[in-house]
Image: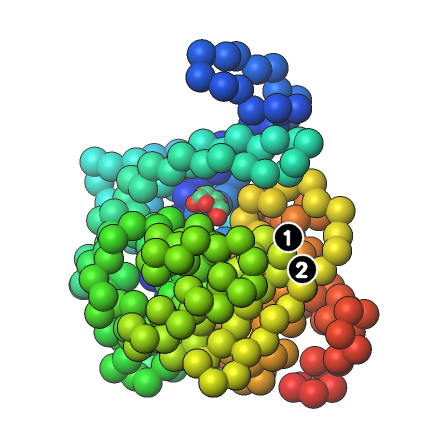
């Protein structure tokens, strides 16, 4: 089975749904409350797992009740926790999420907690998984030293290194230039390139800046406007798949995890993007982050319906 490995965050999502989001000083009565597993790293690794890959996360939790929520999630999914370590004196990562029910858009504050304490030794313990995996994925929700070390492991073993640069922040250029695939959304792409993005033409300009920095493949997700890809020579643009959105939280993670699985399974780039696009689209039709991540069969069905491609026949 194809394997995806990566350093990533484990975060307990505390989510409130409301008819509108409050302005400063306002109290709004919401309609629903949820608490459950999340974190960009965990959501993406979960998405890679549900998309058909063996998926291994290297991460850290605190010594508190929230760690149980995360570990239970991995047990229920049948995913390994062998590289999830515990840090004392710090909480498990937590996120406060507000979802606007009208637009399905969200606002998130994340407290990194134990995700900021991942050491080189923690990553070294997972060396075998880097050696035997087919793709490596990471984000910017753990300490940046751990992101750099994850990149070095990917390079050491010649594995495709997928960087989802979220949440955006200043990072060493070395990490960016070593990305085989970088997958920012429009806001993140603007932060790293200085190009304001409103459409695919702007995404093309921003992608050129990434290519200039040394990135091999650039994938800019544009929400409702689809996804733009280039390797500097060829381009692919996929419109978003039309679905009824109820919660867009974690859609980028569903896209990234499915994409990582597709790369690990050796899909051609166009098919990997279609597979990821379908994974992202399916996730917005359900509430939550990890719970909304789609399974391989549903992604395959949507890819067949939307693009007339049967990945099962082509790749299995
Ligand atoms: O991308 C969505 C995720 O961002 C949430 O699960 C939350 O934990 C934050 O990390």
Q: Are marks 1 and 2 in contact (CB under 8 Å)?
A: yes
Crowding at label 1, few (<14), some or many (≥20) Cα neighbours within 10 Å?
Answer: few
Instruction: First in sequence, mark 1 or 2: give its number.
Output: 1
Q: Residue at x 48, y 68 (%)?
A: 204
How far from the left and from the top, in percent, is residue 248?
Answer: 60, 45
Q: Position of residue 285 (x, y in %)?
A: 71, 48
Label 1, secondary structure: give it: helix
Identify the residue shown where x is 22% and y is 40%: 88
What residue is shown at x 56% (from left), y 58% (from top)? Answer: 199
Q: Nearer the viewer, residue 84 or 20?
A: 20
Report the quarter where the N terminus lies.
Answer: bottom right
Residue drawn at (45%, 32%), measured in percent from left and top?
96
In the image, is residue 247 above or below residue 278? above
Q: Is residue 181 above or below residue 32?
A: below
The answer to whether residue 88 of the structure is visible from this angle is yes
Instruction: Name the side, left or right, on which 154 lies relative to 32.
Output: left
Q: Is residue 45 above or below residue 29?
A: below
- Classify the position of the C terminus by image quarter: bottom right
Provide the residue designation for mark 2: 240
Q: Quadrant of residue 149?
A: bottom left
| Residue 192 location (% of width, % of height) | 33, 58
Give the residue number, with chain letter if any, for mark 1. 224
Question: In the drawing, does residue 113 fall left or right of residue 11?
Answer: left
Does mark 2's beta carbon lie closer than 8 Å to ligand 1? no
Residue closer to the observer: 91 or 307: 307
Q: Secondary structure at mark 2?
A: loop
Percent from the top left, x then y, of residue 11? 41, 43
Q: So how many labels did they put on this image?
A: 2
């Amino acid at each position: 089975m194809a394997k995806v490995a990566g350093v990533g965050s484990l975060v307990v999502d505390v989510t409130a749904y409301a008819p509108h989001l409050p302005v400063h000083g306002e109290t709004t009565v919401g309609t629903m409350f949820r608490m459950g597993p999340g974190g960009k790293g965990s959501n993406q690794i979960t998405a890679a797992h549900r998309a058909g890959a063996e998926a291994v996360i290297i991460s850290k939790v605190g010594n508190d009740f929230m760690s149980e929520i995360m570990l239970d999630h991995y047990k229920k999914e049948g995913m390994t926790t062998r590289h999830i370590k515990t840090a004392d004196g710090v909480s498990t990562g937590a996120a406060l999420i507000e979802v606007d029910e009208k637009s399905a858009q969200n606002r998130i504050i994340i407290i990194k907690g134990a995700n900021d304490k991942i050491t080189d030794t923690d990553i070294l313990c997972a060396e075998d998984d880097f050696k035997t995996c087919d793709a490596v994925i990471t984000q910017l929700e753990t300490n940046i030293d751990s992101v750099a070390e994850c990149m070095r492991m990917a390079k050491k073993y010649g594995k495709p290194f997928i960087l989802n640069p979220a949440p955006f922040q200043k990072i060493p250029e070395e990490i960016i230039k070593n990305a085989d695939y970088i997958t920012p959304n429009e806001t993140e792409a603007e932060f790293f390139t200085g190009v304001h993005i409103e459409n695919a033409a702007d995404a093309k300009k921003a992608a050129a800046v990434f290519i200039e920095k040394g990135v091999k493949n650039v994938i800019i997700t544009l929400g409702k406007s689809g996804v733009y890809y280039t390797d500097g020579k060829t381009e692919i643009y996929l419109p978003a798949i039309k679905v009824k959105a109820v919660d867009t939280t974690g859609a980028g993670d569903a896209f990234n995890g499915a994409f990582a699985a597709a790369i690990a399974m050796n899909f051609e780039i166009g098919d990997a993007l279609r597979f990821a696009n379908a994974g992202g689209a399916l996730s917005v039709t359900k509430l939550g982050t990890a719970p909304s991540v789609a399974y391989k069969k549903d992604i395959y069905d949507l890819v067949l319906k939307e693009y007339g491609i049967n990945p099962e026949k082509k790749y299995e």
